[in-house]
Amino acid sequence: MTRIHVHWPRLIWVIFICAYSALFFYNLLNPSSNWHIPYVYTMVLTVWLCFEYYEKRLFFQTGFAPLPAYSWPLRAAFALFFYSSFVIGVSTIVWWHDSQIPAYPIVHIVGLITLITSVVLRRRMLRSKKITRKMISQFYVSILLLIVSLALGYGSLFLVAYVLVIGCPLVLLMRYHEYTLLAKIDAFAQTHKKKNREELWQLYIEKQQKKQTRKSK
């Protein structure tokens, strides 16, 4: 029988964040009209992000490679885009009523369904035992659905443009970056056939660090 290990400090923190968010966003959104579905959307998104945090995952990367292998400028750019989109979405409900899509509740329900679909696709990807280009593409489809759900879930015309102009190109760049990582580790594996994936990544990262050290001298 498999024992479930519970990380109690992290779990307590996650429960606190979810409870606090439920109260905070209720008080923030409640005075506005047409706030019910955006509130449900916000809470589904918050609970999912907390779950990803509890499992120590960055939700916008597949995680097949160790953190140092990823591009930190891309990570920072997407994090800035995503959380600014969240703030813009909430602000649209509370203050920026003129930029709302005039189709409540249809658009907002579609946004909520799109968010849930994105999460389901991501969870399915995490069960995959082999990393392939197809799996990486499927993962980034889930990220595209996630950012589209922000625009629809909050019914924001500005967010629709923000997602198309900034978000989609960022997602495509991150997908290309992971394609490149996969190709490099597969090529590196050809000369280290007896090593497992973790050992391969460790060797690969050490090799790259040595190259960077030589260039800096």
Image (cartoon, rainbow, N blue to C red):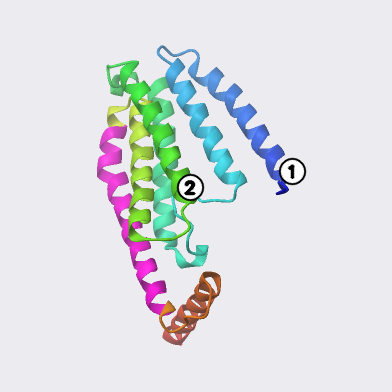
Q: Give the amino acid at mark 2.
A: Phe
User: Residue at label 1?
Assistant: 8
Q: Is residue 19 above or below residue 97?
A: below
Is tag 1's residue or tag 2's residue first in the polypeptide sequence?
1
Q: Give the amino acid at mark 1.
A: Trp
Q: Report which quarter residue 113 is drawn in.
A: top left
Q: Residue at x 51, y 51 (%)?
A: 58
Q: Which mark is residue 59?
A: 2
What number of labels is visible? 2
From the top left corner, tell me how far across and down residue 57 is, in percent: 54, 51
Horizontal side of residue 24 vs 90, given as left or right:
right
State which region is magenta: 159-188
Q: Is residue 12 above or below residue 37?
A: below
From the top left corner, tell me how far across and down residue 136 is, in percent: 37, 55
Majority secondary structure of magenta residues: helix
From the top left corner, tell me how far across and down residue 1 is, in percent: 72, 48
From the top left corner, tell me how far across and down residue 208 is, in percent: 45, 78
Q: Report which quarter residue 124 is drawn in.
A: top left
| Labels 1 & 2 near each other (Cβ < 8 A) | no
User: In front here: 86 or 49?
Assistant: 49
Q: Is residue 74 above or below residue 50?
A: below
Count neighbours of disc 2 (C-alpha within 10 A) and say few if under 14, some if 14 to 19, many if 20 or more: some
